[in-house]
Image (cartoon, grey):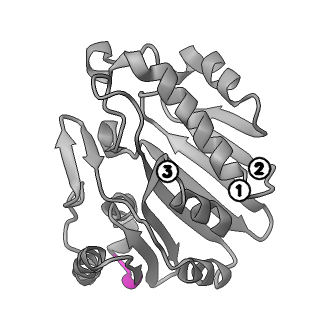
């Protein structure tokens, strides 16, 4: 799990926007927050946090990141309503784009968080860098998509019985040739975007020896182009799930 995060921090093609985790007990919600887009995680678990106290481990990588995470940490115990997006995101219709991503992260803090728990789920949120020509669909730095779902989300799981699992999740239609709205989704770069998705799978699998890797795509529209995804991923030892 640490090797995957470390390799992504070194990537020239993908930016790590945030690394987050949470752990529930009867009375306490424990949170690990780092990076810039942590609202994505807080919105997902808001209903579980309302009836518990919170214990936050916030790990910053710069002064601006430290100030942002401090404000988040101060707001959590008050159960303040979170914004759907972070101050670092630019909202364009139903999408957001983010220019901030982590260059450094104290991985020893992530390792300690994982080691201290029998079951650990770590979420890594990414944006793509230096891809697509400017006149094409602006996939570059795209962070949240339809319904404020992350374009690229990695879930890294440690479980005493299941071992380690790696799930790459997306509900975005940037990979599709025939998306919900052709005039809105910039179809000319769909094949290029899908190749980038394959590069991400390859890049994250290289540092590790893992057999239980899943690419999970959410939305019935993906069924119509499942052959494209299978062809793209056939060289990797991954399973493809379309829900």
Q: Calculate the distance from the C-alpha at mark 1 to the C-alpha at mark 3.
A: 25 Å
Name the residue rendered at 29%, 53% in the picture.
Answer: 99
Residue 181 in percent (x, y) is at: 31, 17
Which residue in the protein does label 2 denote?
A: 212
Which residue in the protein does label 1 denote?
A: 165
SS of the residue under disc 3: loop
Q: 8 or 69: which is nearer to us?
A: 8
The part of the chain drawn in magenta is 51-57
Q: Is residue 52 magenta?
A: yes
Residue 154 in percent (x, y) is at: 55, 52
Q: Is residue 173 above or below residue 167?
A: above
Name the residue rendered at 51%, 76% in the picture.
Answer: 24
Q: 74 or 70: which is nearer to us?
A: 70
Asked if residue 221 shows in the view, the reply is no
Q: Is residue 163 above or below residue 149?
A: below
Q: Main secondary structure of the magenta part?
A: strand
Q: Any mark on residue 12, and which?
A: 3
Q: Calculate the distance from the C-alpha at mark 1 to the C-alpha at mark 2.
A: 5 Å
**Mark 1 or mark 2, earlier in chain:** 1
**Mark 2 or mark 3, earlier in chain:** 3
Q: Residues within 10 Å of mark 3 (few under 14, many from 20)?
A: few
Q: Any mark on residue 138, and which?
A: none
Name the residue rendered at 57%, 56% in the picture.
Answer: 155
Residue 31 in percent (x, y) is at: 44, 77
Q: Calculate the distance from the C-alpha at mark 2 to the C-alpha at mark 3.
A: 26 Å
Location of the N terminus (image quadrant) = bottom right
Q: Residues within 10 Å of mark 2 (few under 14, many from 20)?
A: some
Residues under numbered marks 1 and 3 in contact, where contact means CB atoms less than 8 Å apart: no
Which quarter of the figure has residue 88? bottom left
Which quarter of the figure has residue 69? bottom left
């Amino acid at each position: 799990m640490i090797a995957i995060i470390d390799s992504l921090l070194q990537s020239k093609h993908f930016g790590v926007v945030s690394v987050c985790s949470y752990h529930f007990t009867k009375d306490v919600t424990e949170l690990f927050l780092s990076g810039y887009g942590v609202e994505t995680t807080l919105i997902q678990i808001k209903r579980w946090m309302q009836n518990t106290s919170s214990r936050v481990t916030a790990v910053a990588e710069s002064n601006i990141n430290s100030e942002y995470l401090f404000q988040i940490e101060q707001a959590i115990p008050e159960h303040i309503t979170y914004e759907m997006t972070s101050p670092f995101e630019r909202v364009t219709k139903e999408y957001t784009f983010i220019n901030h991503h982590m260059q450094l992260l104290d991985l020893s803090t992530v390792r300690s968080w994982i080691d201290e728990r029998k079951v650990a789920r770590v979420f890594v949120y990414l944006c793509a860098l230096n891809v697509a020509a400017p006149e094409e669909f602006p996939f570059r730095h795209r962070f949240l998509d339809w319904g404020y779902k992350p374009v690229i989300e990695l879930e890294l799981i440690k479980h005493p019985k299941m071992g380690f699992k790696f799930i790459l999740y997306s509900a975005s239609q940037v990979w599709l040739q025939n998306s919900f709205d052709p005039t809105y989704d910039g179809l000319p770069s769909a094949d290029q975007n899908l190749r980038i998705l394959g590069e991400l799978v390859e890049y994250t699998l290289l540092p590790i020896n893992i057999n239980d890797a899943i690419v999970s795509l959410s939305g019935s529209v993906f069924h119509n182009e499942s052959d494209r995804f299978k062809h793209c991923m056939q060289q990797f030892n991954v399973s493809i799930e379309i829900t």
